Image (spheres, rainbow, N blue to C red):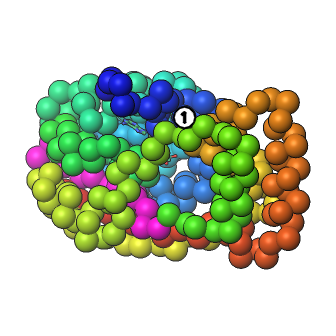
Amino acid sequence: MTGDTEPAVSVVDVYTRCAGDYADHWGAQLTARGRSLVDAMDLRDARRVLDLGSGVGLNSDALRAAAPRAVVVNADGSEGMVRRAGGPRVVSDAHLLAFGDERFDAVLMAFVLHHLARPLVALREVRRVLRDAGRLAAGTWAINPDIRADRIWTEELEAAGAAPGPPFNLGFEATNSPDRVRSLMGEAGLTVERIDTHVMDDPMDVEGFLLRRTRMGVQGWRFSQIAPGDQVGFIERVRARLQELHSDDLNARETAILTWARR
Ligand SMILES: C[S@@+](CC[C@H](N)C(=O)[O-])C[C@H]1O[C@@H](n2cnc3c(N)ncnc32)[C@H](O)[C@@H]1O
């Protein structure tokens, strides 16, 4: 997409920037939920499986184990992420998939829909590339955690004059409850068979929080906009404030919504 109002940096640019850190500083949090999605898909007879928004391919092992007869294709809008995945891989925007009709027995979308500007368009694309009765498993988020540590982080970024980041969770409002996911999938012509929710604690110590926020996602991108000579002082100020907090203020507790649907 182009235009005067588009931010200079997109969601996938942000992922490309932090691709090398993704597995260590965020992806590992998600793999248990990714495995839950895969394990309930019954892929024993599948021949072609698409991991859409595959990132660096952290769900590949689970998919290959669950679908031993299948080719597992990784597709992601971020070149920097998908180039780290193994096996067949392609750069593809979820809104306009680079695949023919009815090519896949199953599609996994693990924590991708909440990033998409038009999640309904992407789900219609998923329906298009699925064979009749093909399966989709998708993970989304119900809660955007609002913890004190992040409020401090944001206050200090503002005080340092860091440029605002690009909108990052563009599809969050459309996908942040089981009812919303069900209705979106229904609109896309997919039949939801099951939805589970899982509360996920994400406790961080001060150094872990600083590592994550300086390197990952849109927060890492904002941090990178601070002049290099000011970054050390910035971290020292934030660290001093974080050290005053209770451990609950550093626990970004989220609720994952896991959905299984059929074309
Ligand atoms: C939270 S990561 C999840 C990655 C992987 N599914 C996992 O579970 O580790 C979200 C992924 O969605 C990708 N993504 C975001 N917007 C996209 C788009 N429009 N088209 C394709 N992929 C997109 C990002 O590049 C990133 O790899």
Residue 118: in magenta span: no
Q: Which residues are magenta?
A: 131-143
Q: Amino acid at mark 1?
A: Val
Give the quadrant of residue 203: bottom right
Query: Residue 64 at x, y = what percent?
Result: 44, 43
- State the residue in front, 221 or 83: 221
Residue drawn at x 80%, y 72% is 245
Query: Residue 57 at x, y = what percent?
Result: 51, 38
Viewport quadrant of the N terminus: top left
- Residue at label 1? 14
| Dominant secondary structure, magenta | strand
66 vs 9, left or right, is left
Query: Residue 44 at x, y = what percent?
Result: 32, 51
Query: Residue 185 at x, y = what percent?
Result: 20, 57
126 shown above or below 237? above
- State the residue in front, 133 or 75: 75
Give the quadrant of residue 74: top left
SS under mark 1: helix
Residue drawn at x 24%, y 52% is 135
Give the quadrant of residue 229: top right
On the rendering, which quadrant does ligand 1 occupy? top left
21 vs 140, left or right, is right
